[in-house]
Image (cartoon, coloured by chain):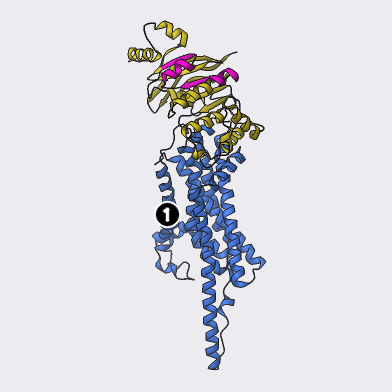
Chain colours: A blue, B yellow
Amino acid sequence: MILTIASNQILALRRQTVFLALLGTLLAMTALAGVLGWSSHQTIVRVYDQAVKILATTGKPAPPNPITLKPTLSLLLNMVVYIPLVGALLALLLGHLSIADDETSGIGRLVFSRQITRTSYVLGKIACAAVVLMAILVASLLVSAVSLLIVNRTISVSDFGRLTIFYSLSWLYLMLFALVGMVMVLVTRRRSLALLSAIGVWLVITFVIPQFTSGLRPTSSLNPITSPVGTSQKFFKVTAYARDYSVAEQYKEASGRILNTATSESIGQTLQRVLPIAGLVIILALLAIRIIRKHDFSRSVNNE
Amino acid sequence: MGPAIEFRGLSHRYDTDYVLRDIDLTIEAGEIFGFLGHNGAGKTTAINILTTLIEPTSGTAMVCGYDVVNERSQVTKCIGYLPAEVRMYGHLTAAENLEFFAKLSGVSDPASAVIETLNYLDCADLADRRVSSFSTGMRQRIGIAQAIVHRPKVLFLDEPTSGLDPLGVRQLRETILRLNKELGLTVFMNTHLLSEVSRVCTTIGVLNHGELIYKDSIEATTLRFPNEESLEDIYVRMEGASS
């Protein structure tokens, strides 16, 4: 039954224009990240070549090529921004559509007059979101790999492995938002309110909490200073503690470590950053299963 | 053969408002039952309980001899349901929609069941068309197809004539009679269209503010109210007497 629900939902999503448009946008953003990285690479190379020529005429030695000092995956640094912005919205919409469509059209009533349990239904929807997001991110991974190949002429096994781990983490992060989209449909009775509430949660996770935990300390944006303010004051103690649970920040930090663009740390420390995201995904999945058991599918959601 | 549907002391309330009060009702297998009542009388709530969508506040409801709360799985095996305003997945074709519902009902060969059902209802031409392009009448036919694709014993129809033109109403009437005669389906139908009730149903029940105020066969009803010209007159008189 889980498979039936999941495969049917995938088929329906494949034919929805809004979803396909957002998917296209994410892939375009991935390609854009590659183009921006390539452009930046070309500019640095050109400036370096000119500097080497000028230095040679004055008899001075040339400094090492900065490109060789930069990690190769830094070309895709923008993906760490695009995924929490565009990707998370895409995931929200995916989760929202998968249940809201069934409610507003009255299909939920037909489905639950059949031999299916509510748990199987919601697990089917979650499985669909997992598969669809995985497919999208695999496409994005391939676009990223092609971008790297174009710029660097080659891609090492290690870099491809890091890229794969980064997209796996991104999948987990996006699952969080797909579940938010689903849960919000189950707790509200108006379709527009469900979508707005889900976007509200996205805003809080992506902007409000990071603003509270890091944004209050202006110098924190100055790399490589990570904890510029002493945590002697109670207020900053709280914000510093909350930072560990700010999933958006932990995602960015972990991504930086995985892509080798941030200060290196042990695998254990990086995994620790992933834990709040995984924990929240599990909590939301359990919450969706719990809510749907009591959800009244006999009354259609108001399609407004 | 035992009763197809049975209510015993059935009540249901939303918050503090009772929509069904202490209903006792038995519908024998093979009947076409017309459930009548004003808007908000509790007809759809009764169907929601019988199709296992909601649980009654008190009392019991049985379908095909199974309790709708404690034996939900057996109940869902033997029922088909067509809600008012059928929509289904607009992006999918009729056949894809039907196959989905056949799978959910545990049909062993869903593809064959879909073709067979569409042929039976003379709408095989709609199989590969997307449901979003269908007229109300076409949707209704596909809606009936989804309700019978797994060969249920009891069919629940909630306001099946709403939005249909006169030709559509006639086609639906013929389909209901055919399903009852050829497949032996018991039909439980909520409707406002009293002219259709008198043509299709074998038994009627009248619900007024959540209470069952009348239940008998069409013949017995006509004999009981010899001075009334039509079922509509009889219904108006019943409603008037109870309010």
- Please tell me whether residue B204 belongs to the stretch shown in magenta: yes
Residue shown at 59%/57% (left/top)?
A: A139
Q: Quadrant of residue B122?
A: top right
Residue shown at 47%/53% (left/top)?
A: A89
Q: Is residue B160 visible?
A: no
Q: Is residue B15 visible?
A: yes
Q: Residue B4: horizontal and vertical position, in percent?
A: 55, 17
Residue shown at 58%/42% (left/top)?
A: A6
Task: Tell me the magenta residue range.
Answer: B177-206
Q: Is residue A164 above or below residue A4?
A: below
Circle 1 chain: A
Helix, strand or loop status at disc 1:
helix
- Please tell me whether residue A247 belongs to the stretch shown in magenta: no
Which residue is at the front of the view, A9 or B170? B170
Residue shown at 53%/28% (left/top)?
A: B144
Q: Residue B228: horizontal and vertical position, in percent?
A: 37, 9
Reading the image, the residue beneath label 1 is A203
Quadrant of the rendering where the C terminus of chain B is positioned: top left
Number of other residues with Cα within 10 Å of mark 1, as a class: few under 14, some 14 to 19, many 20 or more: few
Task: From the viewer's perspective, tell me whether residue A145 is left or right of residue B50.
Answer: right
